[in-house]
Structure formats: C-alpha cells, structure tokens
Amino acid sequence: MKLHRLELTGFGPFRETQVVDFDAFDADGLFLISGRTGAGKSSILDGVSFALYGSVPRYDGGERRLRSDHCFLGDPTEVRLEFTVGDVRWRVTRSPEYERPAKRGDKLTTEAPRAVLEQWIGGDWVGRAAKPREVAHELDEILGLTAQQFQQVILLAQNKFSRFLLAGNDERQALLRTLFGTRRFDQYIDDLEQRRRDAQKQLDTAGEHARTILDLAEQLIDSHELAGDTERPAELAARRQAAELADQRAAYRIEARATERGQADAAAAAATAAHAALVERAQRLADRAAARVRLDTLEAESPARDLDRSHLERARAAEALRAPLDAFVRADAARTDATAARAQAQQAWVDAGGDADADLESLIDQLTGDVARWQAAVAQERELAEKEALLITSRRAESESAETLAALDAQQALIPAERARLEAARTAAAADAARRDVVGQQRDLLVERLGAAREAAELEPEVEAAEAAYLRASTAAGEAAGTVTRLLQRRMAGYAGELSQRLVDGEPCEVCGSTEHPHPAETGDDTVTDDDLTVAERRRDDATTAESSAAQAARAVRERRAAARARMGDVTGDRDAVTVLSDELAKAEDELAVAERAVSAVARFAEQLHELDVLAAAAKVERAERAATLAAEAEKRVVLETTVQSLEVTVAAARGDHETVSQRVAAATARRDLARGLGDAQRTVADRERVYAEALADRDARLAASDFRDADDAAASLLDDAARSEIDACLNEHAAALSAARARLLELELAAADDAEIGDDEVAGAERAAAAADHARTVAIGALRDAESTAGRLRELLLQADEAYAAVAARAEDAAVVSRLADTVAGRAPNTKKMDLETFVLAAELEEIVAAANLRLTEMSSGRYTLHHSDALQARGKASGLGIDVLDAHTGRMRSPQSLSGGETFLASLALALGLAEVVTSRAGGLRLDTLFVDEGFGSLDPDTLELAMRTLDDLRVGGRTVGVISHVEAMKEQLPAQLTVTATPDGPSTISQDLPAPVV
C-alpha cells in the first residue's frame, strides 16, 4: 500500500485546506515531520487513519472532536486521501459529524457524517461507494487490515508500539488475538467441550438403552410364561442366561403348536369334504326338477311361435311388391304438387295484370329486348348522380378555399403582437427557474432527514419490545441459575443419604471402610438426581443463550435507532420530528414545484416562439397554395356543370313513367319472370300426369300376378327389416332353447337315477360340523402364530441387548478419547504447559514476530540485545506461552523488558513493531507496505543509538518504501533534509509546508 496525496480541511488544528504530497518524497524515501509541540504533527497521521477507517489512534470514539476548533460555523470539515493498493489507485473522501448553521432561521443543525470512495479509471475518478457503511465495507476488502492492525503496522503512533513490548501476557494475548483473528480457536475449545459432554451423555444413554432392552425381554418372558419355576437372578450375566433358556422354551412351544395345527387341518379337510358331497347331491336333485319345469314351459309356447312363422312368410312375399307400391305413391304426390304449383303461378300472372290467354313465348321475347335496351341507360343514370355529387363538392371546395384565404390574411396580422407577449412571459419565468437547483438540494436533504426520522420512529416499538424481551430473558436466566444453585445445595445435603443406600451388611463403607453400619443416614423425599441437575443445567444454558441473543438484538436495534437519529439531525420545536420535517419537506416541495413549473414554462415559451415563427412562414406558403387551389376549383366546376346538363336529357328519356331507369328495368324483368314461371308450371303438370299413369298400370299388373287381394292387403302384410329380424330371432331362440332343455333333462335324469332324497336337517348338520372343524383349525393357526411371534420378538430383543452392550463399550472408548482431547486443548491435564489452543497458535505467531524483530534489534543494539519468546508457566493461573524476555549479551542473562532504559526500550519496541508489521502483513495476503510512519520516541536516544536507529529506518527505504518520522529532535532535522513542517500561525490555525532537498546535478 502506498499513500500519494492527503488533503485536510477544517480538521484538527488545520482550518484552511492543507495538502501533503507524499509522492514528492519518493526520491528521498525518508522524510521528517517536524514542528513545535502541539502544532499538529500527529494530526497528519490522524487524518490518514480517519480517511481510511473513520477513527484515529489517539482517540477512543472521539470522532466529534476531529473538527477544527478554529473553524467558523459555515466552514466545512473534510479529509481526502489518495492511495494505491496493488495496481489500483483509490481516493477516499470523509467528513465527520459536526454542527453548522441551518439553511433557514438562525439555529444550528447537525451535518451527518459522509464518505465517498472513488477509483481512477481511464483518466477519471469513478465512484464506487457513497455512504460511510458502504465505503467501510469496500475498504475492508481493499486493505485487508483492521483499523487496529493498520495502526499497529503502518501508523506506529506515539507511545503505541512500546506497549506491545512491555505488556503482560494477558494484555499481549488480547492484542495478538485482535491482530491475527484467533477467536475462532476459542470456539474450537467450546465445541470440543460440548462434544465431551455429548459423548458422556451418549454413553449414559447407551447404558440405559441396553438395560431397557433386557427389561423388555424379561417382561415378554413373564407375560408368556416362559420363565420356568426358578426365580429371576439379579446379576446381568445370569439374567442374560435365563433369557436364553426362555428362548429355548419358546422354540419348543412352536414345535408343539405346529403338531396341533396339523391335526386340526386334517379334521377340517374331512368335515368340509363330507359337507360338500351332501350339498352336491342336493343340487343335482334341485336341477332335475327345474329342468322338467323349463321343458314344459317351452312346449306350451310352440303354438304362438307357429303363428309368428306364418306372419313372417307372408311379409317376405309382400316384400316383392314394395317397389311398385312406393313408386305409385310418389307419382301421385308429385302430380298433386305440380297441379297446385300451376294454379299458384297462373294466379300470380293474373294478379300482375296478365292475360290468361296471352301468347307467353312472344311476350317473353318482347320484354327481353326492352330490358336490354334500358339497361344501358342505368349506367348513365349512375354517372349523372356521381357528377352531380362532384359538382356539389367542387362548389363547396371553391367556397372553403376562398374563406381559408381570408382567414390566413387575418392570422398573419396577429403574429407580431403574440410574439411580443411570449417574449415577456419567458423573461418572467426565467427568474423563478433560476432557483430550482438550490431548492432541489434543500429538498433532497430534507427527504433524507425525513426518512431517517421515520426510521427512528418506526424503531421505537422495536427498541421497547427488544428491551422488554431482554428483561424477560435476563430474569429467566437468573431464575434458571438460581434453580441450579438450589439443586446443588440440596444434592450436597443429600449425599449422605445416597451413600447409605449403597451400604451392604458385611461389605466395607466407601468412606470409613467399616463393615458395620449402625446408623445409616436417612434419605429425604426430595433427593436430587443427576438427571435433575442435567435438566436444570440445560435450562440454565438455554436461558443464558437466550439472554445473550436478546441482549444482542436489543443492542442492534438501539444502534439502528441511534444511527437513524444521527442522520435525522437536530429538530427544534414542540412537535415530533416527523411532523416538523414533513412540513418543511412539503414547503420545499412546493417551492421546488414552483421552480420546476417555471423551468417548464421557460422551455414551453421558447417552444411556442419557435412554433410561432414556423407558423408565420408556413402561413405564407399556404396562402400561395390556397390561391392556386381556388383557381383550379373554379375551372373544375365549369366542366362538371356542362357534363351534368348533357346526362340529364338522356336519362329523362329512358325513365318513362318511372322515377328511375332502374325501377323501369326491374318492373319489366319481374313481368318477364312471371310469364316464364307460368309456362314452366304448365309443362311440369303434363310431365307428372304421364308418370302417374305409368306407375298405376305397373302396380295393378303386379297385384294381379300375386296372392294378395289388393294394394291395401299387400301394404298391410309388409314388415320393416327390424321387425322381420326380431321375429326370426325369436323363432330361432325358441327352437334352440327347446332342444337344449330336452338334452339337459335327459342328462340330469341319468345322473340322479340312483340319488335318494335329502332333508334340510342332514345338510345343516354337515355344515355345522364343517364350521366347528374350521374354527378349531383357526385357533390352532393363531396359537402357532403367537408362539412364532413371541419367539421371534424374544430373539430380536436378545440380539438388540447384545448389540447395545457392545455399543456401550465402544462409546466408552470414544468418550475417553474426546475427553482427553478437550482437556488438552483447554489447557487442563494432561496438558503440562497449561496452554490452551488459541494461546498455542498465538505463541507460534509470537515466535515469528520475535525472530523478525531480532534481525533489526541485533544491529541497532550492536549485538548486545536479542528478544526471546518464553513459554514458562505463569503464576495464579495467568495465560502462559506469550512471554518476551531480553537476553543481554554482556551478562549472558535473561532480563525483563521493563528493566531496559528509555532508549533501549525505544529500540527494542521499534524492532518488535517492525517485526510485528512484517508478520501481520504477510498474514493479510502479503500486502506490500510502501508507506510507513513512526511517531516520536527518538528524544530518548543518545547520538550513537540515534544513528543506529536512523540506519535501521534508512534500510526500510529499500525497494521504494517511503518512511515518515515524526520528531522534534534537532539532530534529526540535520540528518533528514526532506521535511514536512507543521507551523502554528499567530492567530491559532496551523499550516503545512514541504521542504525538499535540491536535486543533485
């Protein structure tokens, strides 16, 4: 990371904008930031830290103090920093929260904090984020360092880097934990501890499960009387052996029940066969009686079937006469219809004025010639109507052209006055339009503040609910913890009673060793068990977790409300902020609407002026066109008047007595059509009379050759296809049924020749015997199934019990492994160093830091001092493994860092800080540090040591790195010609100037 340019405005001791060009020191690589005490040297580093993180290393949450006390109320406060990470150049601009005069009235309002992040792309700055939260998120991704890491490895602030050397193990652990983000290892320890507790619970559960399965097996043995005559043993192995004997008895019971079922199956089969034989003989006798009845019924129907057969044969004979009979009926109907049509046509001809005795053919020829002649005049009649319509249109167009020409002349006379009016209106609207940008900015600010005010108001119920939930969760956690405490107290008080329950006469006591127990302690009714404690502890842990979650939720919603109030700013008056800001926003909206309307009016007036000019030019062109059109319309009107007069003479001659030629043509055509219709009807009647005579002669000839008396007798004998098919099917069906009935009766007579009659009581008795045998068989099957189910369930429980006890042994081994690992990573025995996992990881990091620091400390101390990492045990349970000792080569003994002098402490701290910077940046993805600052501490060094420190800093310039040193030591001013000087002016504010050495020629 490399810094390029820093601008400070109204920040710290700087009121006017001060610029620091870090690129100007690239040639020297090492420059001095000097100035009198209090002038503002460290404020330059504060500006860098504030620009990147919104905080400074010297203040704790002091963002409001960053605004310069020398600023006037209307002066801005802003910090802008340009820097490069990798190959990308960035610019961040940030302003803290401060008070400024309100845009209305004489009160103050709070300016909300602002931040903008931009990227240099293609010669321009392109925005990437525009809100403090978004900018912080983007910079976290870009930098890869937290604010504390950045201040520890880049801004070695005043008295900060010596803190790491002189800190105790606990404080050093806290700092390293923040820099390297190792809190996750605490979670690993907690996870392993939870796994240890879970493994122990699973072990206890597995043992209880195994005992439960064996209890179920014994309950099954007792319920099915498989235990035998012996009493149940108490030991586990004897209980398992007794269950195995019961399993053998269950197997024997299966064999016995299988024999009983075989006997029941044979008896049931015999009874069922006897019953079936009786039922079959009774059915044969019943079928023979039914067959006799069926045959008698069919023979009684034979006479009716003979009549059906005679009717069918007569219908088949009449079928040969169907065609001539139908032909005669159709010819008679056609003759009747034709006669009626002729009478109708003759009446229509007479009604139309026709002569009944007229020569129709001659009349039709005459009318055809007249229609053809008058048809030509129809087209001329249509043309006359069209020409008359065109003449009316032409006269109207000529009149309209004359009127339009007069209107255009009047319109041109009004244009000058309208133009003057529009010019005056545009000038008036431009004055109001000029205020749009100012009013728009005020409106946007009020919109943002009103949104924040509404958000704050909406969050009030959430804050109240979250705090109430926090209170409930806190109360519940306290009650759960109190419950655990009371149970532990009761458990401690009841230990003697529990011990007395395990005493056995003749066996030694677990406490005193005596085999006699004259006064065992009493066991109370409220004994606390391990399960009671486990449930209470689980409830306490759940309540504590819920309390922590509720606290976090309440804190989060309070922070959101505070952020919303900060964005809202100060609101004065007795009304709520939303109402006040809504009123102010409404006023601003009204003012903006007026300005917007004025802007639109200016554009509208300009457009109207342009349209007016276009209209004037178009009116001149249109007037010339209208004059030409008027002349053309007059000429067209004269031609049409001449044509209309000629057509009127021709059409009048063709109309005759009718209103139109078309009506005369239609009347002649209708008269000709009536004459044609009458002639056609007369010819049709003659044709139908001939066909009728032929059909009558053919029918009578066929009837004379048949057995039927007349046409009516033949028609009555006809049957349709469906009726004939139905009678035929009925005759066939009766014949087939009669034949089948005779054959069936013969078969049954032969089969039942030797069968004696059977009574109903005999069949019912056989049925009862078969049902009883079947019930006995069902009972035997159920008994066998029960015996098999009991034996299978017992064998299954025994296998499950064996698997469960095997699982107990396996879980016991796993639980021991997990417990040992959890104790080791938590720093408990067998961990002899008493160092937990996180401390172990941090100790490895500290070893690398010390190794990197010794590369510079050895040179700066002329080989006298080297730092050593110590993992010695600490007293009183303090964290071990993070100690730092100093080896003094002059004495060969280890020393505490606190025993070093001020100058020695500075050198050791500087070396350790540089080593820490290298390790931290390597962990951050190898971020290259091209700019580094060291703030003060050089005043405690003697000239020789100062020279060694300067030589070390000079080595940091290798590879293009730039190092800034903050100091007021005069000797450093002589050694470092490249300087950045901070000077306090007589009236208070400070200024920054850059001094660069003259280039070497």
Image (tube, rainbow, N blue to C red):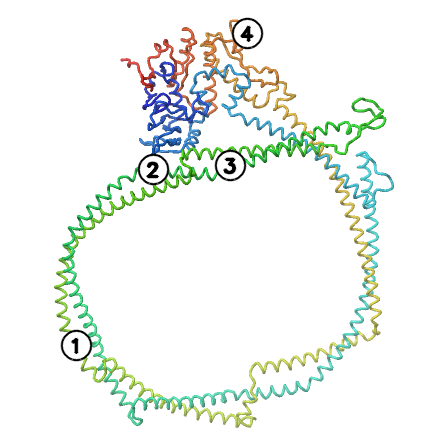
Query: Which amino acid is tagged 3?
Result: Val
Contact (Cβ within 8 Å) of mark 4 with mark 2: no
**Disc 2 designates what residue?**
442
Q: How many residues crowd around disc 4 within 10 Å: few (fewer than 14), some, or many (20 or more)? A: few
Q: CA distance from mark 1 to mark 2?
A: 82 Å
Mark 1, other Cα within 10 Å: few <14 / some 14–19 / many ≥20: some
Q: What is the CA distance from the residue labelled 3 to the residue labelled 4?
A: 60 Å
- SS at badge 2: helix
Kindly identify the amino acid type of the residue bearing the numbered disc 4.
Arg
Q: Is residue 221 left or right of residue 710?
A: right
Q: Which residue is mark 3?
A: 463
Residue at 69% of width from left, 85% of height from top? 302
| C-alpha span from label 4 to label 1 | 143 Å
**Mark 3 falls on what kind of element?**
helix
| Mark-to-mark CA distance, 3 and 2 | 31 Å
Q: Is the residue marked by circle 3 packed among few (<14), some (14-19), or many (20+) residues within 10 Å?
A: many
Of labels 3 and 1, earlier in sequence is 3
- The mark found on residue 278 in the picture is none
Residue situated furthest top in the rendering: 890
- Give the percent coordinates (x, y) of residue 181: 51, 25
Q: CA distance from mark 3 to mark 1?
A: 99 Å
- What is the three-letter code of the residue carrying label 2? Gln
Q: Amino acid at mark 1?
A: Leu
At 59% from the left and 22% from the top, the residue drawn is 836
Q: Which residue is mark 1?
A: 647
Residue 735 at least partly seen: yes
